[in-house]
Image: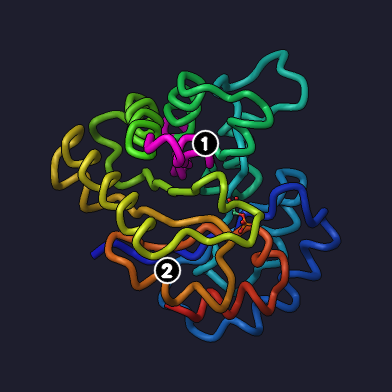
Amino acid sequence: MRPRVIAGNWKMHHGPAATRRFFGEFSPRLSDPEATILIFPPAISLPAAAESRGGRPEVSLGIQNIHWEPKGAFTGEHSAAMALAAGARFALVGHSERRHVFGETDAQVERKVAAAIGEGLAPVVCVGETLDERREARVEEVIVRQLDAALLGVPENAKKSVLVAYEPVWAIGTGETATVDDVAEAHGILRRRLKEVRGDGFAQEVAILYGGSVNPENAADLLSVADVDGVLVGGASLDPESFARIAEAC
Ligand code: 13P
């Protein structure tokens, strides 16, 4: 059985003080979640998150982006080891904003995945097509290409430490959620591809999350779709009440 994962990507929201306030309100609202709760604060807020999530061992932390090198002259970047030392256990890799706003490539995603695993962080590999790519019926081509590149960075013995997030770019921050049929199709493609590339044992252990305008109202429906093992929530994870409601939806 794959574990359920309810993840929140705060993007560039919630500095250290807001992070402490979030956990002060979120932790008491969380009754007894069956899922792993995973929060990706801005890197600068990781220590505040690690201190203030106290008493909730089911809440794990992650970093939104890492550099592939362990150290060096890379102004503004963070290494996987630094993220680990600051309390992260997961790393988002290849989020669509990294790819489309900052020009991150499949080759960089591969190196970041390898760096994360090398340091003991579990990468959450994000894949997803743009609206133009969907209109051109290229969903499978795009997400399989992105997945294949990321898998090149996963050593054979690291099967338990990788997660995948399907986030169609057109559904991120737009209020437009993919239909359950769209989600089922994309997740099925990804599961099949994991099996083709790495075998059934590997494929069955990889949690595949859906992200894109997830909210407390649609979370339960999305979580009921075959091959959806969790959700990656942006905007609705910023508010402790709405994120707690999503966490209770599974
Ligand atoms: P929204 O939930 O705000 O659409 O963001 C999704 C996302 O990008 C999570 O990584």
The Cα–Cα distance between marks 1 and 2, rounded to whole angstroms, is: 23 Å
- Tag 2: amino acid: Leu
Residue 11 lies, in percent from the top left, at 70, 49
Report the residue at 55% width, 65% height from top: 214
Q: Residues within 10 Å of mark 1 (few under 14, many from 20)?
A: few
Find disc 1 in the rendering and name its residue: 132
Quarter of the image with the C terminus in it? bottom left
Find disc 2 in the rendering and name its residue: 222
In this view of the protein, which residue sits in the foreground, 45 or 8? 8
In this view of the protein, which residue sits in the foreground, 138 or 222? 138
Report the residue at 56% width, 39% height from top: 95
Report the residue at 45% width, 66% height from top: 36
Residue range in magenta is 117-138
Residue 123 included in the magenta stretch of the image? yes
Quadrant assignment for ligand 1: bottom right
Quarter of the image with the N terminus in it? bottom left
Could you say whether the residue bearing mark 1 is in a helix, strand or loop? helix
The residue most toward the right is 17
Could you say whether the residue bearing mark 2 is in a helix, strand or loop? helix
Q: Earlier in the sequence, mark 1 or mark 2?
A: 1
- Which label lies toward us, 1 or 2? 1
Q: Is residue 183 above or below residue 52?
A: above
The residue most toward the front is 135
